[in-house]
Amino acid sequence: MAERADRDPAATIVAIVLAAGFSSRMGAFKPLLPFGERTLIDHFVTNLREAGVERIHVVTGFQAGDLAPELTRLGVTRAHNPDFAAGMFSSVRAGVASLPADVDAFLLAPVDMPLLRPSTIVRVLRAAAARDSTIVYPTFRGKRGHPPFVRRALFAEILDSDGDGGLRALLARHEDEASEVAVFDWGCLVDMDRRHDYRRLAAALAGHRMPDVAECETMFDEAATPEATRRHGRAVAALATRFARRLQAAGEAIDPNLARAAALVHDIAKGRRRHAEAGAALLREFGFPEVAAPVARHMNLAFDAGRIDESAIVYLADKLVRGETRVSLETRFGSALDRFANDPSALAGVQRRLASAQAICAALEARIGSLAIDDGTRLALSAGEGSWPAAIAV
């Protein structure tokens, strides 16, 4: 598909949120279930607005009267589907029928995908703004997810369709007009039909601000990070996660998920000029500004001994790993100290980085005890470390 740069679809798109079903397998009405500190529908609408989507149409059906006060409070448009018992396509059609004439396209998602990241929505909109594609699908690890972006060219066909095969079959007839954009978000694939799905996604919410290992690997793919660099990141992440968990157990305010993610991708832009800053810029673009901060500082860090934060942990762990192998600070810095012995400026930089690592090491040992791991030990994330809940199928 040709690339475009002359229109912003966010100004003329509507998000259609499907919330009309019976929720029969859940045993409770999904849109009004508590999710974190909000209802499920509130959480979903908040994510859309965080992504810059302000025009939101929620398709109602079953228990529409119970849902109405929450939709009024949220300030979204209701699109009622009196035929909701006929199935999901009838709700898609009701949502499309509710769109005003100035709408050029819609994003579509069922309400029961609460861990869909705002950054995924942003990436879909950016891809749509740059392309002529009639349909844009987000993909995670090669699988298409929600929300697809669909242009007005298909509105009439949707409204006139008998729904045979659902929306998927209709869109499949336009495969040559479709394109994909990779996202870093397993939440775009996972819905919640049953009570155990709900419990697992609700439990995953607390740590969902940070990318997990699979999402970090997808970012590596997007950045074309070499395999050797990825292996180094995995080793650094294994050590950083160990340090962070011991700090957390000692009562320190630390986020092991942030330490693991930042350590894993700290060299994502290795080989580029000023790779720490370049990597941080990529992570901000990918939607993870909190992870970007430690990545930006992993080469040079002025350590404040008053608090060991995630940046300090990533900095130290990186200095204690050569390739995939645990080494001492003396081993890691020894060759650089020798190499730059006759270059005062470069030598001062090496000495400054070593001094920061030594200060962090001393502060960490004062809080959690010995950091001893035998030199020469190969480090790796354990199987399943930091991935989505194992029982959630994607």
Image (spheres, rainbow, N blue to C red):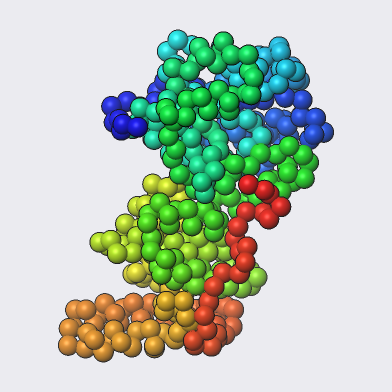
User: Is residue 91 shown left or right of residue 239?
Assistant: right
Please state the horizontal and vertical placement of residue 278, each as a whole percent of the image. Answer: 32, 57
Give the vertical position of 186 relative to 94 (above or below).
Answer: below
Query: 35 or 204, which lies in front?
Result: 204
Q: Is residue 89 above or below residue 51?
A: above
Does residue 13 appear in this view? no
Residue shown at 37%/54% (left/top)?
A: 223
Q: Position of residue 182 (x, y in %)?
A: 45, 44
At 52% from the left and 80% from the top, the residue drawn is 378
* Residue 220 spot, x, y in % from top left: 43, 57
- For the point 45% across and 17% down, which residue is it? 152
Foreground: 131 or 57? 131
| Relative height, residue 85 to residue 325 (above, below) | above
Q: Residue at horizontal 58%, vertical 73%?
A: 242
Residue 143 at x, y percent in the picture:
54, 43
Q: Is residue 114 visible?
A: yes
In which quadrant of the rendered image does the N terminus lie? top left
- Closest to the observer: 361 or 342? 342
Pick out the residue farthest to the right: 27
- The image quarter containing residue 179 is top left
